[in-house]
Image (spheres, helix red, strand yellow):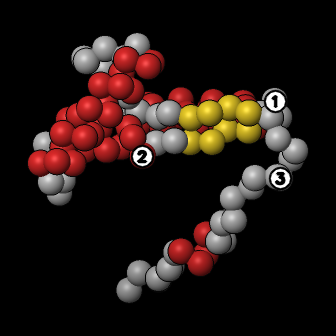
Amino acid sequence: MVAAGRAVQRLWLEATRAGVALQPWTVSTLQLLRLEAFGGEGFTSGERAEVARMGGLLRAAFDVPATATPVFVFRLFTAPRGAYGARRQPWEWLTTIQEAQ
């Protein structure tokens, strides 16, 4: 997963340099990972069945074998710079720094 994250970061940075927008659609892959790697912990039996069905469609659409784990789905498109930018809070808003005692 760490290697996949690094690859996605490189892809995203290259897309940005090339003026191409990248929109992640990862909820499907994260749910499939939760089902396959963690036994669907927290899902109802109906949700497990639906995620398994969706996973089959995802694998078929992208020709991903059952032995591989889909990690990241995204779309690439062109857009005016800043047209779809994320509204992020500054990192300080989410982080607390405390001196060691």
Residue 69 is at least partly visible in this image: no
Residue on which the image places disc 3:
82
Q: Kindly identify the amino acid type of the residue bearing the numbered disc 3.
A: Gly
Amino acid type indicated by mark 1 = Ala
Callout 1 environment at 10 Å: few (<14), some (14 to 19), or many (20+)? few
Q: Is residue 66 above or below residue 71?
A: above
Q: In which quarter of the image is the N terminus?
A: top left
**At numbered mark 2, what does the secondary structure look like: helix, strand or loop?**
helix
For the residues marked 1 and 3, what is the alpha-carbon distance in whole angstroms? 14 Å
Q: Mark 2 points at which residue?
A: 27
- Measured as percent of width and height from the top left, residue 36 is found at 20, 35
Are the residues flagged by discs 1 and 3 in contact, CB closer than 8 Å? no
Q: Is residue 97 visible?
A: yes
Q: Name the residue under label 1.
A: 18
**Disc number lying in front (1 or 3):** 3
Q: Earlier in the sequence, mark 2 or mark 1?
A: 1
Q: Residue at x 50, y 79 (%)?
A: 96
Task: Give the structural element (helix, strand or loop) at label 1.
Answer: loop
Ranked by sequence position, the earlier of labels 3 and 2 is: 2
